[in-house]
Image: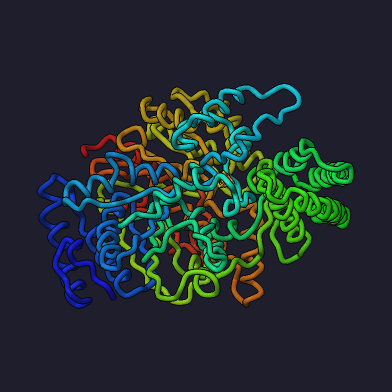
Amino acid sequence: MQIRWTKLPFPARNEAEYRRGLNDWLARVFYEVLPEHGFEVREEQIYTAFRIARALTEGSTLLAEAGPGTGKTFAYLLPAVCHARMHGKPVVVASASGVLKAQLTGPDGDIQTLSRLLNLDIDARVAGNPADYVCELKVEAGDFWTGEEPEGWSDLIRWARRTATGARSEVPDVPDDLWEQISWDPSLSCDTCPRRGHCLMVAARRRHRDAADLVVCDHQLFAQDLLTRNDLLEGGMLPILPSYSAVIFDEGHHFPETWQRAQGWSLSQRRLKRTLERLEYWHAREQVAWRLEAALAAADGFLRALDLHTRPGEGKRDVDRTELLLKAASRLDRALDLLQTELVTEEAMSEGQESLAELQAHQNRIDEIRTALRLFRQPESVVWREGDELWVVPERPKPLFGGAHLAPGTPVIFSSATLEPEYQARVLGLGRFDQSRVGVPFDLARQSLVYLPPDGGAGGAGDAAVDAAVAEAVRVLHATRGRTLILLRSLAEVRRWRKALAAHDLPWPLIFEGDGDRGAQLERFRNEVDSVLVGASFWEGVDVPGEALSCVIIPYLPFPEHDPLIRERRAQAQAAGQDPFRAVDLPEMLIKLKQGIGRLIRTTRDRGVIALLDRSFVGSDFEEAVEAACPEGARRVSDLEEVAAFLSSEQ
Ligand code: SF4
């Protein structure tokens, strides 16, 4: 092992010295340096940092659960930088969202803060998604609109021709359907592209490739890299991410689904039609035009059948794969096959011309559609519609380690406020793993209260059950004087609650998800202190310290409902002789419940109430698990006067 000790913040000439030096240095940073600079350091944070340091050194997989407010980011960044310097290869930090990525890498983000405080000069680079960069080849062909140009198109093309970075972040308001016309997509044959030498997307990739300490990307990009890495290397090409010494997943509870989706395909109506329509402007032989016309007709037939076989609803909608729909998929596949045969002849005729790269990109796009159609026709796949997209994923995702994926011994850290280690390890096919768990660094017994209604529950789906749950929630709101977040399971439920709440003539501003921009709604909830926010997607990503969020009402335990991926996991658990409820539904529910409860206490000064209106867990065999998800040591009450007294008492 090559030790680049000159770059380490402590001297080390061998592995034993490195381990000792790292432990001493971490202790000094957490107990002396950070407090000297005014940082509140917590025991939970220090414990997590040492566990992560050990996992990195031992090359193991660690699922590290640390409650909100623990300071998880510092806990993984410090050992990660040392690990990267020790191995001479960066550590990948994969975050679940752009917001998290910005929190890490912004000028006042955690990486810069540590770099300044500790004089570490951390070299961290963001690996942007290639799809967030312009493809010059596409820009060149950017005049293919026959009818009226969509609004903003000429401005976008003007920008694309003069941008120095090609990054979408320069034009954040451009809608997806316009952006997709000019951005990189996986069908492009970049390795044979004549513009490769000066392409902005390739240049952006080169920048993050040279990172010495950290490469920050999102979960999706990491999954894409892992799935394509070996093939690219074998083909003599560079993979998406540089060679790395470890990977850390921030908000790691999101990765299992990202990993499964990354192994499938999504196909939108718009993309399918556009892929074919773009070929109409290819001045090809008559035979191509005939085949194209047939493919367009088959695509129309398939899309019509797909609409007919998609169940109504929101989120992931079921698709009934009837004989009729499967036949429509086969017809489209056959039509695309014939079209591709003609395009092969076109390719031969375009040899040596710049247009060849564009033609190959068309072929690759059609290949992707055909791969999705083939998987769609196989029973061993999971299929659903989400918005305009048709998703097709293999029913069993490949395991994260082994095969063409992560090499055994690569240290992997899943960091999150809510993990269900056994469940997540099973979904990812992790064989061996360690786990560490620390709660929140707050005095929850003093700062919070759990309210359970004296009897009944919020279960049931009929109007009477909804009215009863709403009536109970209204009683809670009177005790808390608004200042509440109500967490529901779907937007349909939000709409039902809106109707039922209207009958109660409440004196506080009510904000319903779906009425406006999510960020603006959160801002209003934060500023109008007595307001009530009702939503289905606020279980995560809501950070409202202070009085405005004094209560979280959870009317129903958030068991997963109509989700084809979950249904498939249940079936697999059953086939393996497990109880699907305990193996899948319960851990899924607990992850979400813990996220929701975690919205309440964000600082040492917060006080608040968790109102669990669904008492169905009381006396059940999962009562203990729900209890464990509730604030530790907090008093359980069933009297709303106690709730009112708690919130108005001295802090
Ligand atoms: S290398 Fe060529 S095909 Fe790939 S993104 Fe750049 S311009 Fe487009």
Q: Is residue 336 above or below residue 8?
A: above
Residue 21 visible within the image: yes
552 w.r.t. 574: above or below: above
Taking the image as drawn, is residue 318 in sight? no
Q: Nearer the viewer, residue 92 or 154?
A: 154
> Residue 174: percent from the left, percent from the top?
55, 30
Question: In the image, 70: left or right of 430?
Answer: left
> Picture coordinates of residue 65 (x, y %)?
36, 61
Residue 192 coordinates in the image, percent (x, y):
60, 53
Residue sitting nearer the eye, 197 or 496: 197
Q: How is the image coloured?
A: rainbow
User: Who's the residue at 21% across and 39% down the image?
Assistant: 651
Judged from the image, the quadrant occupied by ligand 1 is: top right
Q: Quadrant of residue 514?
A: top right
Locate residue 370: give its quadrant.
bottom right
> Is 364 situated above or below 355?
below
The reply, left or right, for residue 317 in relation to residue 330 is left
Q: Residue at x 22, y 49 (%)?
A: 115
What quarter of the picture does the N terminus occupy? bottom left
